[in-house]
Amino acid sequence: MQGKAKKGQRKAKAGHSFRQELSEKQKKDIKEAFDLFDVDGSGCTIDEKELKVALRALGFEPGKEEIQNLKQNLNNNNDSKENKNTIDFNEFLQIMTEKMNAKESQEEIERAFHLFSQGNDNFITFENLKKVALELGETMSDDELKLMIQEANSKNPRQIIEIHLLVKGM
């Protein structure tokens, strides 16, 4: 957890485990990217095309639908009733914080998954789950463990949890 503290503070978020706040360096880097991709030189906003280019340059691959959803979410959270076609730096920072947190959350899920899978690259077996429960001192019946697997992967009769289904469900 020490490495996480360097990135920023974690904040509890209703319905989610934790939300990572960006460090000052990360905010500065995002501001530099914002300014760099403000190609029309307006200095305070970027448009939809500039947003797409900036996100791609920062390692994200947004589709047209995702860009529309991001803009819609910003417009829904906007105090004024006008439908904005541009994004200011604070809105861009909000988008980047959410995207970076989502990426980190997926990486954390994958790391935990691989600890549970114990050598099975893409799935957790009943035996893997039972062994981890015992190692953690959890007294769970076989039925409870099977139920966990069923809930995670209701369409798979093989009693395994596949990583792509777990990440997709999160």
Image: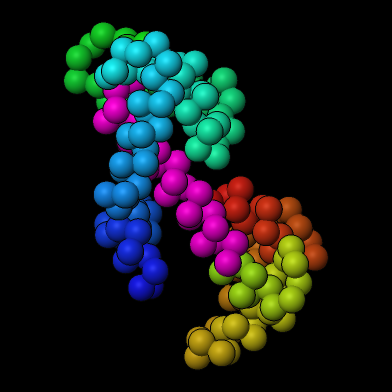
Q: Nearer the viewer, residue 139 or 75?
A: 75
Q: x, y (%) of residue 138?
A: 50, 86
In the drawing, does residue 12 fall left or right of residue 152?
Answer: left
- Work out whether 60 lies above or below 1: above
Q: The N terminus lies in which quarter of the figure?
A: bottom left
Q: Residue furthest right?
A: 158
Q: Residue at x 23, y 11 (%)?
A: 81
Q: Residue at x 49, y 16 (%)?
A: 49
Colour logic:
rainbow
Residue 49 visible in the snapshot: yes
Q: Nearer the viewer, residue 108 or 38?
A: 38
Q: x, y (%) of residue 135?
A: 56, 90
- Give the main secondary structure of the magenta stretch: helix
Q: x, y (%) of residue 29?
A: 37, 41
Specify the quadrant of the image occupied by residue 95. Answer: top left
Q: Residue furthest left?
A: 79
88 drawn magenta: yes
- Work out whether 63 lies above or below 59: above
- Work out whether 167 lies above or below 4: above
In the drawing, does residue 131 fall left or right of residue 170?
Answer: right
Q: Count of labels shown?
A: 0
Q: x, y (%) of residue 131?
A: 64, 86
Q: Residue at x 29, y 28 (%)?
A: 89
Q: Residue at x 35, y 13 (%)?
A: 41
Q: Which residues are magenta?
A: 87-111
- Work out whether 21 lies above or below 146: above
